[in-house]
Amino acid sequence: MFYLYSYLGSFRIFSKNVFERRPIFPFQKNEIDRIQIGRKGHETILKKNKGIWFVQVREIETRPDLEKTFSFLNTILRIKRFTKISPTTDPKKFGFNGEELKLEIQTESGEIGKLDIGISENGTFVKEPNTGEIWIVEENLNSLLGRGNENFFFSRFLLSENIDIQEIHTILIYNSQNKNTTLKIEQTKNGIWKPLSSASFFCPGEDCSRIVHKIFSLKAEKVLKKPFEEKIIPLNFKKHFKVEIHFRSDQNSFLVLEWIGNTIHDEPVFRSDSDSILYVVDPEFLREFRETSENKNFFIEESDPI
């Protein structure tokens, strides 16, 4: 009988440990439809619409950084209870002082999971709202959340990572200073980009792939969102740099990437697919176009302070 009780006691401890080491959220990655994270009134929402992810901060909705989004999603689905904190310990010691981050995930079927994340240095303390239990977890959650930076999940790519490159027919690069000098690039075959204009000095050997790669890999140094706190100096009407991307399926619909001004530090500011989001890019992007061109005034005058 003693051995039976010992066995049953060990089994209960084993079962309890197994339960506690299971992931807190019993969902699969493909089931997740919506994630909300942040302090009250300062939430960031990651949501999926027809298989495409978007990020929303208050009224601003834009493209997310997919690498950060999927890394965060994979991590929160792996979170397991590691060590339980004594219920007699003051929660404030672990970052639960009213400023903790509230995490809520929702599946396509409407199931909801919630977790509070303490504002400790590394974010390894979590609290289950339903029970009030505080646990240590192995994941460094604060680093995956940008430590409360509302812009953290915004994509810094000026063009969407979801664009089907093979569907692009032509790319136009031009400026208002010289309408007769427009670089027109056509995708003749998948991945083969040829110049269709006289400005072929940008495409050595009739190969424009370097320019195309440069445009699609362009990432902002920082992202600005409305209301814009940083002053933006509009361009002189004589200065203009714009990229138009036309698709095979609909020639009347195209994407526009446009240089619209500079910061007070002479950093170029670009607009892409939304007036609510602007992108501050490295001045080297425009400078390389100027230095590549045989005509030094093609994109930017030599006196431009970039």
Image (cartoon, rainbow, N blue to C red):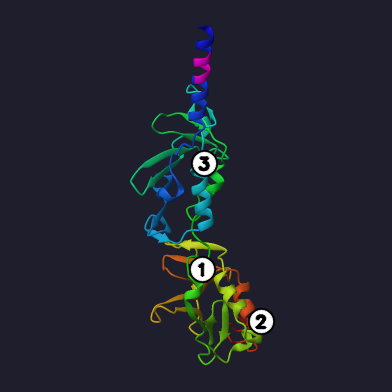
Q: CA distance from mark 2 to mark 1?
A: 22 Å
Q: CA distance from mark 3 to mark 2?
A: 49 Å
Q: Is residue 34 visible?
A: no
- The image's mark for residue 158 is 1
Residue 129 in which image quadrant: top left
Q: CA distance from mark 1 to mark 3?
A: 31 Å
Residue to which mark 3 is pinned = 78
Q: Earlier in the sequence, mark 2 or mark 1?
A: 1
Question: In terms of depth relative to the viewer, which is nearer, 40 or 170?
Answer: 170
Q: Could you tell me residue 83's position as x and y percent?
A: 54, 28
Q: Residue furthest left?
A: 110
- Total labels drawn: 3
Residue 203 in which image quadrant: bottom right
Q: Could you tell me residue 281's position as x and y percent?
A: 57, 68
Circle nearer the viewer, 2 or 1:
1
Q: Earlier in the sequence, mark 3 or mark 2?
A: 3
Q: Magenta stretch: residue 163 in it?
A: no
Counting other residues with Cα less than 10 Å from the Cα at mark 1, is it few (<14), some (14-19), or many (20 or more)? Answer: many
Q: Earlier in the sequence, mark 1 or mark 3?
A: 3
Circle nearer the viewer, 3 or 2:
3
Residue to which mark 2 is pinned = 291
Amino acid at dot 2: Glu
Where disc 1 sits, the SS reads: loop
Counting other residues with Cα less than 10 Å from the Cα at mark 2, is it few (<14), some (14-19), or many (20 or more)? Answer: some
Circle nearer the viewer, 1 or 3:
3
Amino acid at dot 3: Arg
The vertical placement of 232 against 131, above or below, is below
The residue segment tinted magenta is: 7-11
Quarter of the C terminus within the rendering: bottom right
Question: In terms of depth relative to the viewer, which is nearer, 209 or 299?
Answer: 209
Q: Could you tell me residue 209's position as x and y percent?
A: 60, 78
